[in-house]
Image (tube, coloured by chain):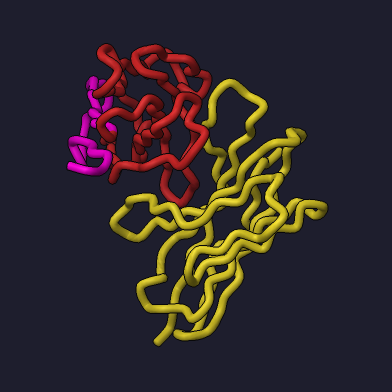
Amino acid sequence: GAGVSQSPRYKVAKRGQDVALRCDPISGHVSLFWYQQALGQGPEFLTYFQNEAQLDKSGLPSDRFFAERPEGSVSTLKIQRTQQEDSAVYLCASSSTSGGYNEQFFGPGTRLTVL
Amino acid sequence: AQKITQTQPGMFVQEKEAVTLDCTYDTSDQSYGLFWYKQPSSGEMIFLIYQGSYDEQNATEGRYSLNFQKARKSANLVISASQLGDSAMYFCAMREYGGSQGNLIFGKGTKLSVKP
């Protein structure tokens, strides 16, 4: 496919469960960003990868959140022991240059609901 | 302090008329970029238009134009000849180029409803 894809599109988890959200960026894109969008809010930055290196994780809300991009392409955002406040849409974006200094292309998001 | 402020939670516009969505920003960087994204109910973020801080001309992309007033730190989006398909959430965002990477900082958004 030509665009950024994310899976699953919807995830329902019971409080305390671990979840893993996947992002497939556009092929060849160097930069990959994760954002969290709470209901009725704008997206907020979580973490940034340049190839396989996680250069910034300052936006991760707690140590329950973990992201990886081991081969510099697909990325996984993992949330351990989910809480109700983790309910949000998780957006992935990729960009062709390092630092993301041009247009970021967004995926459709994963809507996480924690019961 | 909010870096991006969108003061209009919701806006209505008649089909075929123009509408302005407000955005003000706060940064101490000299080099930065301003973006507008559209988010329909399906959820994807669609890039609309970009303005760099050193660009002297206001950006335009088809029916979209960005009214950039640097001294007032405002970057309003103007949509001309509104269409029913323009109904969506609109987000203003900024990227500061002084940092090591270019994550976007978003406002809270404006919900635009186009009336037939």
Residue at horizontal 71%, vertical 38%? B1
Q: Residue at x 54, y 30 (%)?
A: B102
Q: Would residue A11 be counted in the magenta stretch? A: yes
Nearer-the-camera pick, A53 or A7: A53
Furthest-front residue in this view: B56
Q: Colour of chain B?
A: yellow
- Looking at the image, residue A37 lies above or below residue B59: above
| Magenta residues (range) | A1-25
Q: Residue at x 23, y 37 (%)?
A: A6
Query: Chain A appears in which tint?
Result: red
Residue B15 location (% of width, % of height): 45, 85
Image height check: is A39 above or below B20?
above
How many marks the image carries: the answer is: 0
Give x and y (percent) for residue A75.
28, 23
Q: Quadrant of the C terminus of chain B?
A: bottom left
Q: Is residue B89 visible?
A: yes
Q: Quadrant of residue A92?
A: top left
The reply, left or right, for residue A60 in relation to residue A16 is right
Give the vertical position of B110 relative to A85 (above or below).
below
Residue B78, position as x, y percentages in the image: 58, 69
Above/below status of B12 relative to B89: below
Q: x, y (%) of residue A82?
A: 31, 24
Q: Give B80 or A38, whichever is nearer the viewer.
A: B80
Q: Is residue B8 visible?
A: no
Q: Residue at x 35, y 73 (%)?
A: B85
Outermost residue to the right: B71
Q: Is residue A15 magenta?
A: yes
